[in-house]
Amino acid sequence: MREYGENKTNRPMDTSKLRSLFLTSLLATFVSCGPTEQGGEKEAGNSVAEFVPLEGTNWQLVQLEVAGGFVFTPEEPGKYVLNFRSENRLTGTSDCNRITGSWQQESATLRFEPFSATKSLCVPGSLHNYLALNLGAVVTHTFRDGHMIMTTTTEGVEIEFEALE
């Protein structure tokens, strides 16, 4: 498994995206070092940013944890991409299928409504069915160490993405 922040595509990241990720990480570190309501401190290794605007960003799948604790990691993360476009348009790919729809973000809430994916039969081992099923049920998201973690209405389901470019 690769470390957080490692560029899996071997492509240089756009400097504006790097700057944004750096500032997000810096903010998350600052927030995580402050006192909690109980007077203690949060662990710096688990830094969480409260809000990052998604418009104009692109993300690729890192891993998908489904009900029952099964964790799936894509062999080719670049086949599973979400593009958060202007006017709340969502586009992307899920292996051999296309994703379209709308996204709504408010604080920690994230919803994909409407959400659709084509239904081509991908090669065995594809994560398309798991991803398409669970993206439609996303209700919240957080940002941790430069990654976006989405959760669904089903307990124990987490979809983890990393920023592209």
Image (spheres, helix red, strand yellow):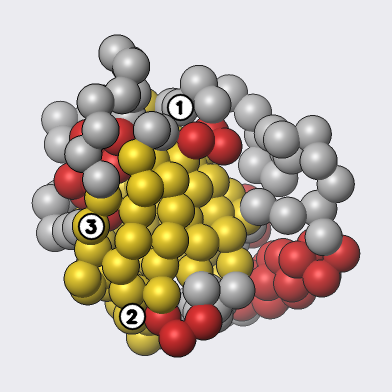
Q: Position of residue 125 (x, y in %)?
A: 33, 16
Residue type pointed to by label 1: Pro
Q: Position of residue 131 (x, y in %)?
A: 29, 42
Marks 1 & 3, CB-CB < 8 Å contact: no
Frontmost residue, 123 versus 29: 123
Give the residue at x 58% y 59%. Answer: 58
Binning the other alpha carbons within 10 Å of mark 3 as few (below 14), some (14 to 19) or many (20 upward) gives: some
The mark nearer the N terminus, 1 or 3, is: 1
The CA distance from mark 1 to mark 2 is: 26 Å
Give the residue at x 85% y 46%. Answer: 12
The mark nearer the N terminus, 2 or 3, is: 2
Give the residue at x 46% y 41%. Answer: 80
Q: Which residue is mark 2?
A: 104
The CA distance from mark 1 to mark 3 is: 21 Å
Q: Which residue is mark 1?
A: 74
Binning the other alpha carbons within 10 Å of mark 2 as few (below 14), some (14 to 19) or many (20 upward) gives: some
Q: Is residue 17 placed above or below 128 in the rendered structure?
A: below
Residue type pointed to by label 2: Gln
Q: Quadrant of the N terminus?
A: top right
Q: Which residue is mark 3?
A: 116
Residue 46: image quadrant is: bottom right
